[in-house]
Image: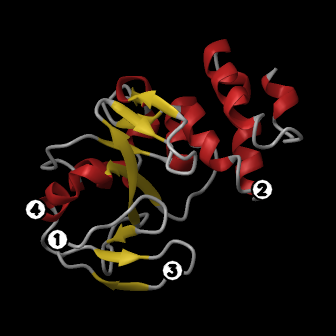
Amino acid sequence: MSPIDRSPALTAVRTLFHAYPCPYWVAGGWALDLFADRLRRSHGDVDVVVLARDLDEVAKTFTSPRPMVELPETGVRRSWAPGEVLTPGPHALVLPDDPNPSPIQILFAASDADEWVYHRGRGTIRKPLAEITLRSPDGIPYLAPEVVLLFKSRGGRPKDHADFDDVAHLLDPGRRRWLHDRIAPRYPNHPWLPSLR
C-alpha cells in the first residue's frame, strides 16, 4: 500500500463509500496526490465525485447522517430531501458535523451512457468513464489528472497553478494533448498551454 493510500482522509473516504454500489472518484487536489503518489500539500477537504444519474443510490446509501446540500459558491447549507434533483456544478453534498480528518464533499458529474460529460462544456467535452478512472495501489478510484486539471484551469487560484506545476511533468503525451486541446479553444492565452505543447 502506498503511504498516500494510508492517509486518514482517504481512509475515511474508503470507509464512507464502502457500501455505495455505484462508481465514485476522489477528485481535486487529492486525486492529483494519488496520481503523483505523494502528499503534495495540505487540503481543507476531500472532493468525491459521483454520477448525477446515481443520485437515488446516494440517498439510499447515506442515511445516517443524511447529507446536506451545500452551494459551493457560497458555502450555504440546507437539508436535502431524497427525490430532490441535484445538478453538477451548483450543488454538492456534505455531511453535517463531519467527524472525518478532512471533511468530505460529494460532487456530481454529468454522464451519457458510458461517457463522462464536462458539464461546463455544453456537452461537447467527453471522455469514456473507463478512461477517467484511475486506481491507487490500494484500489482507491480517482479522477484522471487531465480531467482534474481541466476543472482547475478555469480558476486562476494560486493552488490550482501550483497543482498544475506539481504534476504537469508527470502527464504522458496523450494526457497532455487532451488537456491542451480542451483548454486552448476557450482560453488561447492560458498560462498552462506552453507547458502542454
Q: Relative to 147, is 162 on the left or the right?
A: right
The answer to whether residue 37 is visible is: no
Upstream in sequence: badge 2 or badge 1: 1
- Give the residue type that dot 2 points to: Gly
Upstream in sequence: badge 3 or badge 4: 4
The residue at 17%/47% (across/down) is: 18
CB contact under 8 Å: marks 3 and 1:
no
Label 2 and label 1: CA atoms lie apart by 35 Å
Q: Mark on residue 43?
A: none
Q: How many numbered badges does the structure rendering display?
A: 4
Query: Quick one: which residue is furthest to the top in this view?
Result: 173
Say above or below: 64 vs 49: below
Q: Give residue 3's position: percent from left, percent from top.
A: 44, 36
- Give the residue type that dot 4 points to: Lys
Residue denoted by label 4: 60
Label 3 and label 2: CA atoms lie apart by 20 Å
Q: Give residue 66's position: percent from left, percent from top.
A: 19, 75
Q: Give residue 130's position: percent from left, percent from top.
A: 35, 24
Q: Secondary structure at mark 2?
A: loop
The residue at 56%/81% (across/down) is: 74
* The image quarter in which residue 197 lies: top right
Say above or below: 79 vs 55: below
Q: Relative to 139, is 54 on the left or the right?
A: left
Q: Mark on residue 156?
A: 2
- Give the residue type that dot 3 points to: Gly
Q: Relative to 75, is 87 on the left or the right?
A: left
Residue denoted by label 3: 75
Upstream in sequence: badge 3 or badge 2: 3
- Give the residue type that dot 1 points to: Gly
